Image (cartoon, rainbow, N blue to C red):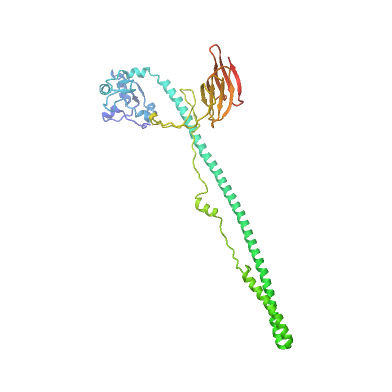
Amino acid sequence: MASSFHSCDVCDLRLITNPCIVWCTECDEGLCKECHEHHTLSKASRNHSVIPFTDYQKLPTDVLKISQYCSKHNKKFEMFCQKHERPCCSKCIVETHKECRDIVDLDDVIKNYETPNALSEIEKTYVEVAANLQKIRQHQQDNVSTLKNKRKEIEKEINKTRMEISNYLDKLEEDLMKHLYEVEEKENLKIGQLLSALEKKEKEVADCQRNITNIKQHATNLQMFLSVKQIEEDVSSKDKFLHSLFEGEDLNEHFLEFEINGVFQKIMFDIKSFGEVHIKEQPADIVLSRKKTKEAQIIVPIVQSRSIENIKMKIHKKINLQGKWIYGCCMLPDGRLVFTYTREGKVRIFNNQGSKDFEMKIPCGAFDIVYISNDNTLVVTSGESDKQYLTIIDLVKKKLRIQFG
């Protein structure tokens, strides 16, 4: 906005300071009371439009910056070029617009221009723009909430997966520890049995040693002779027992060893992350209001155009159409393909894999076909020169809905 105080521009030239009370839109100057009276009586300015300076101060800054003089030639705008839609001074016409035919008087343009209606339309447009901005802002705020909610869902999924893996590893650990103790117990049992046998043999050897001492001291020669034979047999049996231990596997030393499953080692080296988080983008489904067309438009992503010469086509898929004399075709939103067979009087629908979904019999020859999205139907034209038909096919129920002859 302008300053609350503005001195009279005419008085400023006379080095006098007087507050202006009006603003002349033609002279683009502020006038005090005395200068306003002279301005009103002067022949050159008596028809100029003036407004109270308080009203002038209420104008937006952008409007106050608009000059009525050409910035290049410092001359007042007098004409208007309709071709370039720009105001012109007398020099602009000679230098820049000498080839333009549609140059008219600027005052005539202003008189004929329906400014109130134009501003009213602009106001309506601003209302729609504000509403559309609010829609977009709300859409983005909803997107933030959606991201937050999805992040929480992913957190729960990660924690759940982590817990499932932990529980599974705990179960594997529990089973392995149980097996470890079982193997140890089994080996301890074998060694314990051998130790018991060895202790028994040691006791027998000790008894024999005591008997030999007693025999030496107290037995007769006959008793000693007979005892030696018996003792030799006993020693021989124990010696054989010892040799049998060495020849067999009973004395093998047993160790517990552990080898981790190679899959787990592979996991530790190959798996670098628990998962991946990425952003999926899709076009916004914001419906904007359009005053001029009275139709809602949907924001769609801008697709960068390419020259036809740079486009190379390739076969995406081949489909056996199961017939000849095909006149009409269309593609459904779900990717299915529809064809009309004139000679057979049929309509065949194929899925996106190329297999036939279903077919319908049409009276006479079927020609053109179109998909109606409002009620998910197909409209088929058929017939001959003397009689024509319109057939509506219900895609949900897969049957003829109605025929017009």
Residue 360 in the image: x percent, y percent? 59, 23
Query: Does residue 100 sit above or below 207 in this rendering?
Result: above
Is residue 123 left or right of 323 when viewed as pictured? left
Residue 274 in the image: x percent, y percent? 52, 48
Inspect this view and state whether residue 394 appears.
no
Residue 214 in the image: x percent, y percent? 71, 85
Q: Residue furthest top?
A: 386
Q: Nearer the viewer, residue 16 or 30?
A: 30
Residue 319 in the image: x percent, y percent? 52, 29
Q: Quadrant of residue 388?
A: top right
Inspect this view and state whether residue 217 appears.
yes
Q: Nearer the viewer, residue 183 or 124?
A: 183
Quarter of the C terminus within the rendering: top right
Say which residue appears at 61% left-offset and 23% top-offset.
Answer: 399
Total marks in image: 0
Query: Does residue 92 sit above or below 219 in this rendering?
Result: above
Quarter of the N terminus within the rendering: top left
Q: Nearer the viewer, residue 154 or 52?
A: 154
Say which residue appears at 43% left-offset and 20% top-offset.
Answer: 117
